[in-house]
Image (spheres, helix red, strand yellow):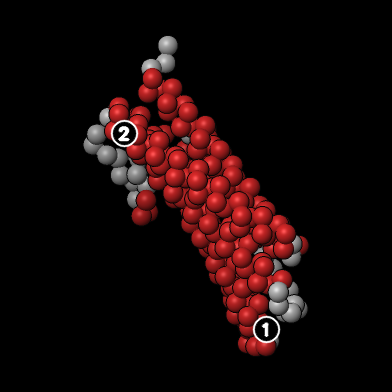
Amino acid sequence: MPSHLERQIERLKNEVIRLGTRAEESVQKSLRAMENRDMALAEQVIAEDRLIDELEMDLEEECLKLLALYQPVATDLRYIVSVLKINSDLENIGDQAKKIGRRVLSLCNQPAHGQVFERTKLIERASWSVKHCLDAMFNLDAELARKVIDAEAQVDELSEELAAQIQEAMSRAPKHIGSLLDELSICSHLEQIGDYTKKIAEDVVYMSEAKIIRHGGIHVPKHH
């Protein structure tokens, strides 16, 4: 029969899945709003961010309660500490989606800049990273997590290419500087989403293998 702590950790897993699903949905909605200049959907993303914030706070409280009540060790401790960090990163992903939503509203309230940018690959890669960092977390799949970590470099490269396109457009069409700045900000938010997926993936490796792989190296704690 599972212990009380094991049951609480199982509940924790369900809650982090719920938060992760919400964050991913928010990202996808914000990207659809951007592609379709859909103000109603952008407003929905902004409004629903409050739910992500509430889930994040509840999950943090639950993690701290488990640490205080049970003083877990080894695998259980590693899991709870990792969930605390992942919890914050998921909330940050939701924040980036909300910021994209706000930029979409700003774009919709300005004259069209008429510029065409190649951002399909960036959107696809950022979306892939969100989906697969969550899959890695749900399944404690270190191999998939490492693929997400590797993919972050491509997100950076694609966002830099898009930023260069937008900056060039600014010099060609200075009268549209406001809307082009919105485009540049969206590019930055996508890059940051990639950064957070990498951090989540690094924590998944720690959860499953007790290896700390941040900062480009591998460190195995003495006590795990």
Q: Which residue is at the front of the view, 43 or 151?
A: 43
Going 37% across and 51% down the picture, which residue do you hit? 214
Q: Which residue is at the front of the view, 209 or 7?
A: 7
**Residue behind mark 1:** 176
Going 55% across and 51% down the picture, which residue do you hit? 50
Q: Position of residue 147 (x, y in %)?
A: 52, 46
Q: Which residue is at the front of the view, 203 or 40?
A: 40
Going 48% across and 28% down the picture, which residue do you hit? 11
Q: Amino acid at mark 1?
A: His
Q: Which quadrant would the N terminus be assigned to in this image?
A: top left
Q: Residues within 10 Å of mark 2 (few under 14, many from 20)?
A: some
Q: Which quadrant would the C terminus be assigned to in this image?
A: top left
Q: Position of residue 60 (x, y in %)?
A: 40, 42
Q: Residues within 10 Å of mark 1 (few under 14, many from 20)?
A: some
Position of residue 199 in the picture relative to residue 41 (left or right): left
Position of residue 158 in the picture relative to residue 224 (left or right): right
Label 1 residue SS: helix
Q: Position of residue 187 (x, y in %)?
A: 59, 67
Q: Is residue 193 above or below residue 107?
A: above
Q: Amino acid at mark 2?
A: Leu
Q: Is residue 220 visible?
A: yes
Reading the chain from its start, which is encountered first: label 1 or label 2? 2
For residue 119, which quarter of the picture? bottom right
Going 66% across and 59% down the picture, which residue do you hit? 43
In the image, farthest residue toward the left: 222
Q: Which mark is residue 5?
A: none
Report, in whole angstroms, how far the alpha carbon at label 1 lies from the one at label 2: 52 Å
In the image, farthest residue toward the top: 1
Q: Which mark is in front, 1 or 2?
A: 2
**Residue behind mark 2:** 67
